[in-house]
Image (cartoon, rainbow, N blue to C red):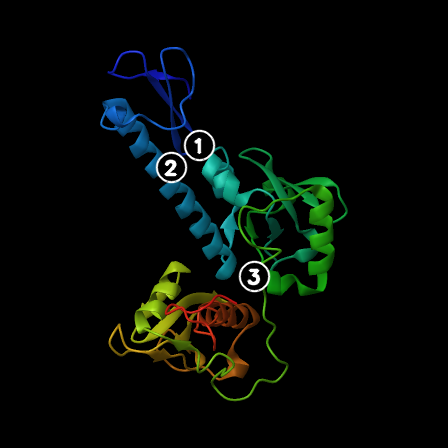
Amino acid sequence: MGWIETESGGYAVTLDGTRVLCRNAAGRTLKQVPAKLREDAEVVRLRQLAEWLERHERECREQVDTWLVRSLPVPVDLLARVWPDAAWQGALRDLVVAPVAADGSADVARAGFLRDADPQRGLGVVDLDGDSVRLGAAQGVRTVLVPHPVLLLDELEDLREFAAELGVEQGLEQLFREVWRRPEAPAGEFVRTYEHGKFAELRHATARAVSLGYRVRGGEAICPLVEDGRQIEAAFWVGDDYPEAEALTGPLEWRDRTGRRLRLSEVGPVAWSEGERMAALVYAGRVVEGDESDKGALL
């Protein structure tokens, strides 16, 4: 973006990413916008644009994260349409994508790092052999998945090493997202690993959950999920007393769309990993013995 003259003579402003820059009549870029220009029409316009860009970038990341967490098939045509947008491209570039197999799962054998998306040629990816290939209608690929890393466990270390060789920097946590593997034969209906986490005030626990992107409802932190086409949610008890009252965390559980509590053996690998991830992140903000902070310590 070029420099725009302000109503106050001699000053010009521009947008650098999401930051408003100002230069004086001598052409020197100032450390900050002078106070007398803060209500200038052009400065206000650029500030509003910066706020919109920040919100747009956040919404793009959240949408792609939803595709990953819920294992949702994404049309190749859709990715090609949004690719020219810098915010979408920042969220998508270098993610591992894989064609959707006949059973709806990720065809990991044909997976690759997303480097380009074109309406005519489809997706440009670097496959696991280091070759640049296309995934699109010409190759019989109309939808792809952004696989959750727990579905890539057999290849995850190799993918991480290959990503380092390529200099990959993902705009969204995928390969380096923490994962929790479901035990072979889990029993019961609750995970109790994260019980008895103490928060000096309930509002500290709920605020932490919300800041991490989770909903809070009925005393629980909630993570909506979709696995194998089934809508479920992970729920982690944080308390339902007065906001200023002390709170202790409780069990982690999963429920289907009717509210029926699932047995742990019914919970799929992605839902298990994301549920434990939510509980672990909230639990990490608990008060640690010997910590004088009312808000708890981050481990």
Which residue is at the front of the view, 265 or 190? 190
Residue 74 x/y as whole percent: 50, 50
Disc nearest the viewer among 1 and 2: 1
Q: Amino acid at mark 3?
A: Gly
Q: Which residue is mark 3?
A: 104
Q: What residue appears at the point 32 percent right and 73 percent down from the top-left corner?
A: 201
Q: Which residue is mark 2?
A: 53
Kindly tell me whether residue 107 is visible in this rendering. yes
Badge 3 local density, few (<14 within 10 Å), some, or many (20+)?
A: some
Q: Amino acid at mark 2?
A: Leu
Kindly tell me whether residue 230 is visible in this rendering. no
Residue 247 x/y as whole percent: 34, 78
- Asked if residue 290 is positioned above or below residue 93 in the image, the reply reads below
- Asked if residue 123 is positioned above or below residue 23 in the image, the reply reads below
Numbered disc 1: secondary structure:
loop
Q: Which residue is mark 1?
A: 17
Badge 1 local density, few (<14 within 10 Å), some, or many (20+)?
A: few
Q: Quadrant of residue 123?
A: top right
The number of callouts visible is 3
Q: Quadrant of residue 66?
A: bottom left
Which residue is at the front of the view, 152 or 1? 1
